[in-house]
Image (cartoon, rainbow, N blue to C red):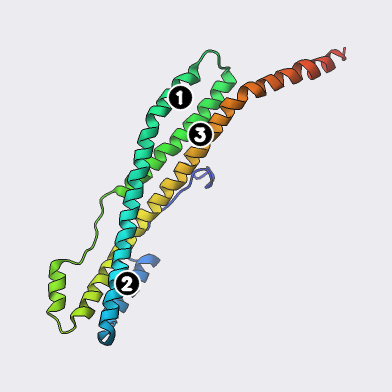
Amino acid sequence: MPKLVPEWLWPRLTLSSATTDSPQQRWLRKEQEKVDQGSWSDISDIALEEARRLFDSEHERRRGADSKAGLYLAAITALMPILASILPALWDEQISTWQRGIHLGIFLLALLFLMRAGLWALKTMKISASTVVSPGDIADSFNSEEPEENLAKQLLKAVIQNYDANNNKISCIKMTHEYLLRAFFSFVVFLAVQASWPAAAWAIGWIHNELISPLMSCFP
């Protein structure tokens, strides 16, 4: 979509890249260094508990985004038969050309929003690499002199390595939500125009026949 289209109408998002010189990657490297240099032998049990909490929290963020994307895709799929039933009515011969054009324009805009929401939902559910603490990592941790501290570091490293991918998933599901909202409001406008058109047409006709035509007849 061209950048001439305002952001409020067509939201845009640039996902964070894996470029080593990006501010996000520099921040992640600093976080990694803090974990590597950390020494928590006196409070290793607390460190392990907090590391597990962070790891579980990031896992829930990832799973929550995937679950929402699945629900959004199901809702979009369920809407398709309804949209298919609306489209033939737009070509009814009793509808004026102006009414047909306005209805069709709003309908196509809503459909475009809906399709873009579906694409963002698919991008959310796209399979991506996820770092986990493997059985070998746990075994190595407990073979070391500070098992709890080493295991906490392994968990925190996994959290850091998954941070970018999880943030991208959250950003994608937010974009899905934004486009679904725009599709919803477009369909509300479509129904409002459809419902109010006969009354508006009658009012315009009355004004023309009762007010404008008499005034025009007064001039030679």
> At which x and y percent is residue 65?
35, 53
Name the element at disc 1. helix
Q: Are marks 3 and 2 in contact (CB under 8 Å)?
A: no
Compared across the picture, whether 140 is left or right of 192 comes to left
Residue plotted at (45% across, 19% down): 88
The kind of residue on which mark 2 rests is Arg
Name the element at disc 3. helix
> At which x and y percent is residue 51?
29, 73
- Taking depth in this image into account, of 116 and 24 the one nearest to the observer is 116
Instruction: Name the quarter where the N terminus is drawn.
Output: top left
Q: Is residue 61 above or below residue 5?
A: below
According to the image, label 2 marks what residue?
29
- Tell us which disc is closer to us: 1 or 2: 1
> At which x and y percent is residue 6?
54, 45
Name the element at disc 2. helix
According to the image, label 1 marks what residue?
86
- Circle 3 Cα neighbour tier, 10 Å, few/some/many (<14 / 14–19 / ≥20): some
**C-alpha gap between disc 1 and disc 3:** 11 Å
> At which x and y percent is residue 9?
52, 43
- Circle 2 Cα neighbour tier, 10 Å, few/some/many (<14 / 14–19 / ≥20): some
The kind of residue on which mark 3 rests is Phe
Instruction: Name the quarter where the C terminus is drawn.
Output: top right
Tag shown at residue 187? 3
